Image (tube, rainbow, N blue to C red):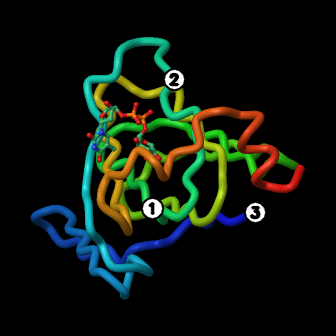
């Protein structure tokens, strides 16, 4: 399946911690967009779509949340609870996010500007596109 966990270098000292993300280095694409999800209400799930072209790295910079990643053949659950780890999602992967902790701030770096036509929001269409 086209996703992986990327470990970021963490500069820690007696003042605390710092992680720097750089395009085409720690993040393996040109970053055109950053967005973040926060103040998520109890019991809420988000996502429920795939992307045709967009590559993304998701980092839980505070708190925790879980992803379901589905390539049409298998589903994998991933916990994000560490600001030094990013979830890299490439290609056509159906994603759902759930189990957001109260303080969760989920930051996402994207390879493209926002484009609604890049979203596949219908699960049957997703299965067809992924050849399943
Ligand atoms: C994804 C997961 C992880 C914009 O106007 N610009 C943007 O860059 C984004 C991301 C969203 N929006 C608007 C579109 C909707 O009216 O914000 C609203 C909420 O977006 P959506 O319902 O798509 O949010 P999620 O949390 O379901 O999905 C988001 C991303 O959209 C998606 O690309 O992979 O987070």
81 in relation to 25, above or below: above
Is residue 97 found left or right of 75 in the rendered image?
left
In the rendered structure, find residue 32 and report the number of the disc placed on it: none
Task: Work out whether mark 2 precedes mark 3 in sequence or the reverse, and give the earlier one.
Answer: 3
Label 3's element?
A: loop
Is residue 75 found left or right of 29 in the rendered image?
right
> What is the residue that sits farthest to the left in this orientation?
15
Calculate the distance from the C-alpha at mark 2 to the C-alpha at mark 1.
19 Å
Task: Work out whether mark 2 precedes mark 1 in sequence or the reverse, and give the earlier one.
Answer: 2
Based on the displayed image, in which of its 4 quarters is residue 48 positioned? top right
Residue in the image at 23% along x and 71% along y: 12
- Residue 116 or 102: which is nearer the viewer? 116
According to the picture, the residue beneath numbered tag 1 turns out to be: 56
Q: How crowded is the residue under tag 3: few (<14 C-alpha within 10 Å), some, or many (20+)?
A: some
- Residue 26 or 82: which is nearer the viewer? 26
Is residue 113 found left or right of 78 in the rendered image?
left
15 in relation to 73, above or below: below
The image shows residue 72 at horizontal and vertical percentages of 81, 47
According to the picture, the residue beneath numbered tag 2 turns out to be: 45
Task: Work out whether mark 1 precedes mark 3 in sequence or the reverse, and give the earlier one.
Answer: 3
The image shows residue 84 at horizontal and vertical percentages of 38, 64
According to the picture, the residue beneath numbered tag 3 turns out to be: 1
Label 2's element?
A: loop
> What is the residue that sits farthest to the bottom in this orientation?
25
Q: Quadrant of ligand 1?
A: top left
Answer whether labels 2 and 1 touch (C-beta < 8 Å).
no
Q: Is mark 1 within 8 Å of ligand 1?
A: yes
Q: Quadrant of the N terminus?
A: bottom right
């Amino acid at each position: 399946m086209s996703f992986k966990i990327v470990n970021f270098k963490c500069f820690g000292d007696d003042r605390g911690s710092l992680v720097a993300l750089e395009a085409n280095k720690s993040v393996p694409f040109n970053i055109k967009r950053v967005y973040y999800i926060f103040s998520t209400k109890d019991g809420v799930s988000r996502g429920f779509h795939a992307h045709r072209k967009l590559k993304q790295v998701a980092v839980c910079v505070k708190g925790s949340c879980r992803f379901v990643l589905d390539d049409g053949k298998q589903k994998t659950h991933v916990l994000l609870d560490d600001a030094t780890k990013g979830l890299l999602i490439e290609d056509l992967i159906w994603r759902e996010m759930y189990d957001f902790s109260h303080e969760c701030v989920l930051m996402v770096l994207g390879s493209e500007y926002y484009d609604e036509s890049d979203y596949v929001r219908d699960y049957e269409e997703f299965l067809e596109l992924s050849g399943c």
